[in-house]
C-alpha cells in the first residue's frame, strides 16, 4: 500500500485530498491518502503534496516541526503547487525558510496579486490542461547543468511547471480543476519507484 500525505498546515488541503483519491481510483491503484501535520506522520509517507497558501507560514511550520529533515532524510517525493513551488526552490525573491529540494529560483507572485488571479488553457505532459493561477509564482531560472531537471510547461514566456528527479513544482492549482492528469502523473511516478 502506497501512502500519500497531504501536508495540512495551510491552504487547499481538502481539494488535494479529493483529487488524489480520484486519481488513484482512475489508475486503479491502492493508495492511502492522509492529511499530515507533523514529522511523525510524514515519516510513513511515500509521497507528499504541498498545497497553495502562504509559503512563509508553511515554511516556518515545516522547519519548526522538523518536517523538512524527514522529507530530506527519507528522500520523499514532493508535489508542490503554488506556495509548494516556492518551498521546493533553492532560492526565491524573499528571505524565508525553504525546503531547497530543487535547483530552481522562484519569483513569488510573478503574475500579480490575488485580484490578478486568472484561468487559462496550458499544455502539460503533451495534453491541454486548465491552468488556475492564484497569486502564482513562476520559475525565474534553473540549473541547466543538471540533467535531472525537465521543464514540463511554459505559459506567457514563464516556466510554470518543472520536475527534478521525483519532485514536481507547479505555479498553478491542479486541485481546483476537474482534471486528475497531474495527480495521476505524480502517483504513477511513486508507484514506478516502489517496483
Image (cartoon, rainbow, N blue to C red):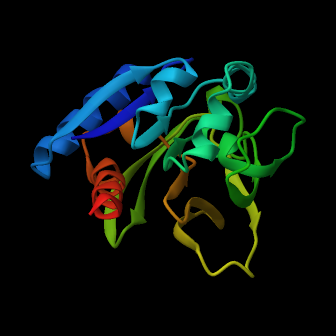
Q: Image check: 105 left or right of 82? A: right
In percent of the image, x 55 and y 73: which residue is there? 150
Q: Position of residue 3 (x, y in %)?
A: 31, 36
Residue 51 vs residue 177: left or right? right
Q: Relative to the observer, which residue lies in front, 4 or 43?
A: 43
Looking at the image, residue 129 lies above or below residue 4: below
Residue 46: x and y in percent read 39, 43
The residue shown at (54%, 45%) is 74
At 9% from the left and 49% from the top, the residue drawn is 28
Of 140 and 142, the residue lying toward us? 142
Position above or below: 9 against 19: above
**Number of marks:** 0
Q: Position of residue 77 (x, y in %)?
A: 49, 50
Give the image quarter of residue 56.
top right
The quarter of the image holding the N terminus is top left
Quarter of the picture containing the C terminus is: bottom left
Q: Quadrant of residue 128?
A: bottom left
Is residue 103 at all visible to an observer of this figure? yes
Which residue sits at x=40%, y=31%? 5
The residue sitting at the right extreme is 95
Instruction: Give coordinates of residue 105: x percent, y percent.
Output: 78, 56
164 or 2, nearer to the observer: 2
Amino acid at each position: 500500500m502506497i501512502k500519500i500525505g497531504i501536508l495540512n498546515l495551510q491552504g487547499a488541503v481538502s481539494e488535494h485530498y479529493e483529487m488524489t483519491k480520484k486519481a488513484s481510483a482512475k489508475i486503479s491503484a491502492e493508495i492511502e491518502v492522509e492529511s499530515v501535520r507533523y514529522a511523525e506522520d510524514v515519516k510513513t509517507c511515500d509521497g507528499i503534496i504541498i498545497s497553495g497558501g502562504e509559503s512563509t507560514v508553511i515554511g516556518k511550520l515545516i522547519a519548526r516541526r522538523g518536517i523538512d529533515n524527514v522529507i530530506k532524510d527519507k528522500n520523499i517525493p514532493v508535489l508542490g503547487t503554488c506556495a509548494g513551488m516556492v518551498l521546493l526552490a533553492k532560492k526565491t525573491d524573499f528571505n524565508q525558510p525553504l525546503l531547497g529540494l530543487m535547483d530552481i529560483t522562484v519569483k513569488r507572485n510573478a503574475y500579480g496579486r490575488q485580484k490578478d488571479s486568472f484561468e487559462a488553457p496550458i499544455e502539460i505532459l503533451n495534453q491541454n490542461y486548465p491552468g488556475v493561477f492564484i497569486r502564482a509564482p513562476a520559475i525565474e531560472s534553473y540549473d541547466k547543468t543538471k540533467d535531472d531537471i525537465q521543464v514540463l510547461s511554459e505559459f506567457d514566456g514563464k516556466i510554470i511547471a518543472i520536475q527534478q528527479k521525483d519532485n514536481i513544482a507547479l505555479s498553478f492549482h491542479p486541485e481546483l480543476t476537474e482534471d486528475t492528469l497531474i495527480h495521476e502523473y505524480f502517483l504513477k511516478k511513486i508507484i514506478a519507484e516502489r517496483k
